[in-house]
Image (cartoon, rainbow, N blue to C red):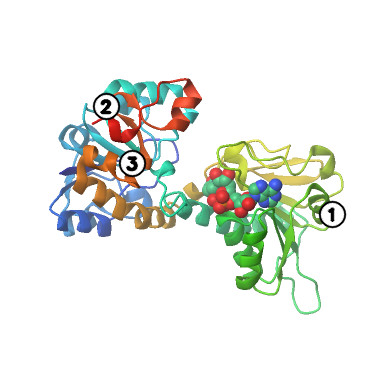
């Protein structure tokens, strides 16, 4: 197969769909890899690095899309890319179809086969979302520590304290991938960490693996209210799959928090778990409500495109190879890759997307 790797054109998107190690693996499996000139530069990967592993570099997106049987990228195609997509072409990327009717209609019309990273289920988890949650969880503590510095508007407190001075209290709502990674970082810096989740089995597991400065608490509206009073930094990391994030902190609760405390609501992409959360960008990441600083950037991994690209492609690489090896028809029958099939040959093949827009649903293994 000819596999194309275009340059991302979404604003502030510096990640790339394949790194040289992934290209080497695909070339080794007998595929041709075509990379658009400069596609990897935002992530610190030069054109020469692709050429060294046997990939070919071409000048324009039109050349990549025009020649490729399969496109591997990061973000959903934008309107400028729609005309480049061909009937029968395989696309493997993040789509988040339910968030855009225009994108869904464009891909249905294109006749392309769209396999979405975000819906691929393997061993009861979403392995192509995990690396981005790992990045966001770790970053949440890094940006939270920065916001707590006085010149940035915070309380002027060091997360780990020093001998003789108490550390900061970090309250983390949700102990999934984001929450666990945030807890590890905050605990490593020496903070007093409180991690809340509603899943008792998860709390039991975390109590075995977390260091002693992480206290595990069952999440309830009462516990949340009790904990945020002491918090210097709150990290919002809850997820209820397929639903809006539950609002665990109401506006009136903010008045009970310390002046200059910081909230990093990582769950902003699902509506946020703090009532006063509204999406922000890396250009203007924070705002203050009732003396509490809010950081609500919806694409946190975008700030660290190199780490994010390597983390993402470590996870997507093996599935991209499997998809290319099988082709769309066989992949649609596969119990794992079939879960990523959202649109096949003009038909909607994901129940969530079909429900979101009232479209007829076809099981992926009945289409091609
Ligand atoms: N802003 C960003 O850049 C960014 C990046 C990656 C992920 N995210 C978002 O972060 C959120 C968390 O992702 P994740 O991968 O950690 O999900 P996850 O499914 O691994 O973990 C979510 C956890 O929340 C817990 N939970 C549910 N309801 C709760 C409640 N009422 N109180 C306490 N805990 C509760 C669940 O039991 C689960 O352990 C998601 O909304 C995800 O989309 C945002």
Front residue (pair 9, 91): 91
The residue that disc 3 covers is 338
Front residue (pair 155, 359): 359
Q: Secondary structure at mark 2?
A: loop
Look at the picture and state if 262 lies above or below 36.
below
Residue at position x 73%, y 37% in the image: 276
CB contact under 8 Å: marks 1 and 3 = no
**Sequence-first disc among 3 and 2:** 3
The residue that disc 2 covers is 345
Q: Secondary structure at mark 3?
A: helix
Instruction: Give the Cα separation between the discs numbered 3 and 2.
Output: 14 Å
Instruction: Give the Cα separation between the discs numbered 1 and 3.
Output: 45 Å
**Sequence-first disc among 2 and 1:** 1
CB contact under 8 Å: marks 2 and 1 = no
**Sequence-first disc among 1 and 3:** 1
Q: Secondary structure at mark 1?
A: helix
State which mark lies toward you, 3 or 2: 3
């Amino acid at each position: 197969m000819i596999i194309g790797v275009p340059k991302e054109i979404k604003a502030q998107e510096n990640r790339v769909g394949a790194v040289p190690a992934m290209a080497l693996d695909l070339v080794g499996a007998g595929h041709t890899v075509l990379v658009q000139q400069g596609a990897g530069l935002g992530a610190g990967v030069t054109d020469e690095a692709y050429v060294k592993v046997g990939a070919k570099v071409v000048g324009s997106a039109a050349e990549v899309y025009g020649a490729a049987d399969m496109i591997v990228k990061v973000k959903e195609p934008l309107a400028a890319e729609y005309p480049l997509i061909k009937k029968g072409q395989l696309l493997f990327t993040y789509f988040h179809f339910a968030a855009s009717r225009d994108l869904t209609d464009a891909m249905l019309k294109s006749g392309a086969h769209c396999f979405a990273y975000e819906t691929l289920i393997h061993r009861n988890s979403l392995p192509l979302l995990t690396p981005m949650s790992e990045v966001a969880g770790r970053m949440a503590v890094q940006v939270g520590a920065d916001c707590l510095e006085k010149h940035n508007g915070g309380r002027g407190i060091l997360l780990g304290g020093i001998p003789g001075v108490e550390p900061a209290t970090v309250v983390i709502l949700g102990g999934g991938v984001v929450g666990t990674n945030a807890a590890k970082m905050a605990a490593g810096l020496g903070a007093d960490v409180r991690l809340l989740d509603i899943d008792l089995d998860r709390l039991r597991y975390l109590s075995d693996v977390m260091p002693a400065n992480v206290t595990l608490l069952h999440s309830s509206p009462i516990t949340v209210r009790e904990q945020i009073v002491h918090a210097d930094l709150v990290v919002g990391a809850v997820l209820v799959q397929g639903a809006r994030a539950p609002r665990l902190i109401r506006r009136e609760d903010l008045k009970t928090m310390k002046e200059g405390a910081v909230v990093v609501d990582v769950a902003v992409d699902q509506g946020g778990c703090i009532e006063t959360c509204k999406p922000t960008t890396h250009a203007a990441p924070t705002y203050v409500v009732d003396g509490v600083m809010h950081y609500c950037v919806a694409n946190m991994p975008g700030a660290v495109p190199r780490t994010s690209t390597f983390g993402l492609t470590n996870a997507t690489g093996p599935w991209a190879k499997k998809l290319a090896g099988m082709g769309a028809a066989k992949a649609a029958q596969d119990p794992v890759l079939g879960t990523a099939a959202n649109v096949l040959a003009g038909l909607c093949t994901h129940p969530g997307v079909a429900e979101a827009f009232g479209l007829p649903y076809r099981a992926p293994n009945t289409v091609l």
